[in-house]
Structures are given as structure tokens and as C-alpha cells.
Amino acid sequence: MQNVYFEVFFKPVVDRDKKVRYRKLKVVKVRGKNGEELTLGRLLNFLTHQFDKISNHLSEEERLMVELPLDFLVSQTLIEGLPLEKLNFLLGNPITKPNEKKIFKIKQLLKEYQKAQLEVSFYYDTYLSYRYSFPPKDVSFVCIPSEREDLNFHRNCFFNVDTSETFEKLKEKGNYFCGKLFGDYGKVFEINALSYLQTTISRALEILEDEDTDISALEKVIKTDPQLAVSILKYANSPLIAPPSPIKDIKHAIIYLGLERLKEFLLMIMMNNLASVDPEFQEIALRLGAVGLLVEKKGKERKLPFSGCQLFLGGLVLESSKIFKKPVEEILNMLS
């Protein structure tokens, strides 16, 4: 099995005072020795699962800049689960030319997202095509590519360039310009299958492992992940197991489902999340999970003086060192 992981890169976007305002995101999937950049829906899907880890590398005043086609704003399920107050969407040309009805829907969604504090930027050509639909006052800035020569803009809009060379060219031509400059991409960190196990679900499973499970603590952890909370409520209200009256809050769902059934459901969701980003991650996670559960079972049978969670993690660490061909100490550092 080839080692599969993701490399996360940031490109700083600074203002004229050289202060970093945004970190533009790039993610590369690495399989063996080959790398492929994630774009479009794959990038957005990755972000919804990994925003917490990525945002740890942003300062309080910085936002994460994500490049998306204009028509991807209708991906409500993915976008609404993100903390929009920490994002700037840099919008490019749509994949398919939207009709008036779709443009109207995008405008309405954009208003809702901006009420939730999302900042929006445009690439130059996209802005020229759709500027009458999206007023300049609602746009953070427009990114001007280096190859453009005909640069005439309305003074109400803030503008941006993609390189320092473009900045100098504009300055020489005397164009009105309020600049935020892009720097160079730099690798920030890697995300592997072990990292994917460190999620809201893993924190919830840890609480479930406690003999005296704290339902309130479990409810609080689940509520930090809106998508997970919705999934649990849908499951609790599904036709096969639904109660006589609908379940509307997480605590009620936890009590109704019971801890064992909830644990099984969370493990299933974790596997599905891995598969949605990359099938090979699911394969690795299934292998790790199988070994961890086997060690947990054998440890309990032999009455070893460890909790189920400790036994599971012990098996996971040993199997991980084989898969990733790294010493046990390094695997422990990755998990910590």
C-alpha cells in the first residue's frame, strides 16, 4: 500500500504596510512520489473536514483565502458548516455559465454568507463579467493577473495583484490601486490518515470510552461540529428507529440512541468522512481500526490493566509504524 497524505500550503496576502491579511490555501494530495493539487469541490470537501487543523495555523486577525468557482457558492451543505467569519472566498469563473435564475440564487446565498461575516473577493475577469450583480461595496478586492494591460476600474472597488511585478507595473502606469500583495507558497504541515482520526468524532469516542460517560460533555463536543450534529439528529429520526415524536436536540438523541449504538454510528461516519476525501484513506483507517479493536478485545480478555481506549491506541500506534514505516516514537508524536 502506497503512503497517502495531504500537504497544506499557505501563500501570504499582505497589504501595503506588509501586514499579512490572508493566507491563501493550496492543498496537494501525495500518493507515493506523485502529487496532485486539490481544486474545486474536492478542495471544499477537504476544508469542511479539516478546517480546525488548518485554522490552528492562522493568527486571530488573519482569514483563510480559498479559491472557488462562482457557481460553487450553491454548495450550501459544505459551506454552511464552515466558520465563515474566518474565510475569504476568492471567486473565479463558473464551471458552467449560470442563467439569470442561478445568478439570483447565488446573489441571495452570498448575502446570507456575508451576514455570517464571510469576505468575498473576485478574479479580475470574473469581476468584469458579473460586477453588475455583485456591488463593489460587497467585494473585499479584485485580484488582477500579471498579464492584464487594460486596467481601468471604478474607484469604489479595492484592488489586488497576484505578484510584486504586477504591483510595480500598475504603479508605473499610474492606475488607481489599493494593494494587497501575494507572497510565495510555503508548506505549513501534512495531514495523514492518523490526523483524520483526530476529529470531533474521535473526541466524542474518547468520552464514550469512559465508564461514567458525561452526557453533557458529549453533547457539547458534538455541537461544535454542525454537520455531525445534523447527521445524528437525522439518524435518531430515521424511519427504522424513530420515536413516536421527533427528536429535536442532541442530548435527547444521545439518550434515545444509547451509547453503544451512538458509538457504532460515529465509527461509521468517520469511515465515510475518510472515503469522501480519499478512498485510500478509508482503506488505511479500516486497517488501523481493525488492529486497534483486535488489541482492545484481546487486552480485555486477558484483563490487562489498561482502558479500552488505551488498548485500542496501542494497537493503532503499532500498526501505524508498519504502514508509515516510521518509528513508534514518531507515531506517538504525530498522535499527540
Image (tube, rainbow, N blue to C red):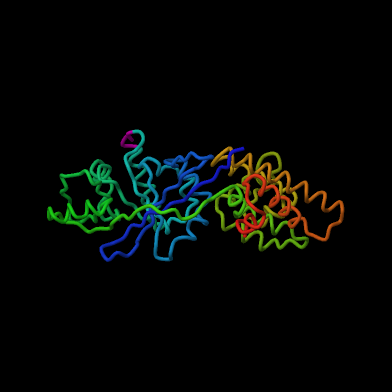
In the image, 145: left or right of 314?
Answer: left
Q: Quadrant location of the C terminus? A: bottom right
Give the image location of residue 136, x and y in percent: 25, 53
Between 172 and 206, the residue placed more toward the observer is 172
Q: Residue at x 32, y 34 (%)?
A: 97
Give the image location of residue 227, x and y in percent: 55, 49
Q: Is residue 197 above or below residue 210?
A: above
Give the image location of residue 251, x and y in percent: 66, 57
Is residue 336 magenta-colored? Answer: no
Q: Residue at x 27, y 52 (%)?
A: 163
Give the residues in magenta.
97-101
Give the image location of residue 281, x and y in percent: 59, 42
In the image, 275: left or right of 56?
Answer: right
Q: Is residue 190 above or below residue 214?
A: above
State the count of labels. Answer: 0
Q: Quadrant location of the N terminus? A: top right
Is most of the magenta stretch helix, strand or loop? Answer: loop
In the image, 299: left or right of 109?
Answer: right
Between 330 and 336, the residue placed more toward the observer is 330
